[in-house]
Amino acid sequence: MSRIIVGIADLRISQNIDDALITYALGSCIGIAVYDPGVRVGGLLHFMLPDSSLDLNKARQTPAMFADTGIPFLFKSCYRLGAKKKRMVVKIAGGANILDNSNYFRIGQRNITALRKIFWKNNVLIDGDDTGKSHNRTVQLNIFSGNVVVKNSSGIWKEL
């Protein structure tokens, strides 16, 4: 199996059944794994912030940095490889309260809220969820099976 690393503010798409897409260090960031079992196309997005209006120039250069630009980019990239929205399985992880003990910035919660609003407006259901709390996560999507697993900071893997 070939592991393809998805960095921060990054996304990767694959239709190679030997690939696994993996992203590390999801704190307040969100990882979104999408998979179409009909054509075995999957993608993984690691976005940092909820709204591209913070920096429109940065959003044009790096759309995966923001929820409102990264999520459409993720889905459209999968569609170009034959995925269909009605078959897509969607799983999310991250959005933790990290380094913000006062909960002043609430970036993790704002990221979760932004993605849920985008999904709601576009009739996208979430099939698996491991969000919130106060620990980092690693997420892996297996293209052959569509399985998504999450590892928490204790090193324990679980399937979403």
Image (cartoon, rainbow, N blue to C red):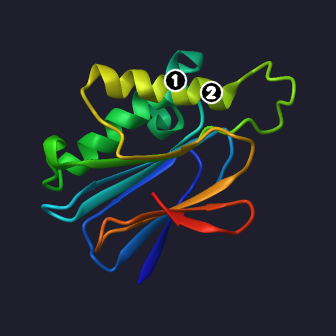
Figure check: 40 above or below 100: below
- Quarter of the rendering containing residue 9: top right
Q: Quadrant of the C terminus?
A: bottom left
Q: Amino acid at mark 2?
A: Gln
Quarter of the picture holding the N terminus = bottom left
Classify residue 102 as left or right of residue 156: right
Residue 23, image x, y percentages: 55, 59
Q: In front here: 41 or 152?
A: 152
Give neighbour class at mark 2: few <14, some 14-19, many 20+ (Cα, 10 Å). Answer: many
Discs 2, 1 touching: Cβ within 8 Å: yes
Measured in 3D between alpha carbons, the distance from the residue under mark 2 to the one under mark 1, in whole angstroms, is 6 Å
For the residue pair 153 and 140, the one nearer the viewer reads as: 153
Q: Residue at x 29, y 71 (%)?
A: 145
**Number of residues whose C-alpha sits closer than 10 Å to that of mark 1, classed few (under 14), some (14–19) or many (20 or more):** some
| Residue shown at 52% from the left, 21% from the top | 51
| Residue that protrudes farthest toward the bottom in the picture | 1
Asked whether, in this view, residue 30 is left or right of residue 86, the answer is right
Per the image, the residue denoted by label 1 is 113
Asked whether residue 24 is in view, the answer is no
Furthest toward the top, the residue is 53
Tag count in the figure? 2
The residue under the point 14% across, 63% down is: 39
Q: Secondary structure at mark 2?
A: helix
- Left of 69 or right of it: where is 22? right
What is the x, y in percent for residue 150? 55, 60
Please say whether residue 142 is visible from this viewpoint.
Answer: yes
Q: Secondary structure at mark 1?
A: helix
Please give the label number shown on residue 109.
2
> Residue 42: horizontal and vertical position, in percent?
30, 58
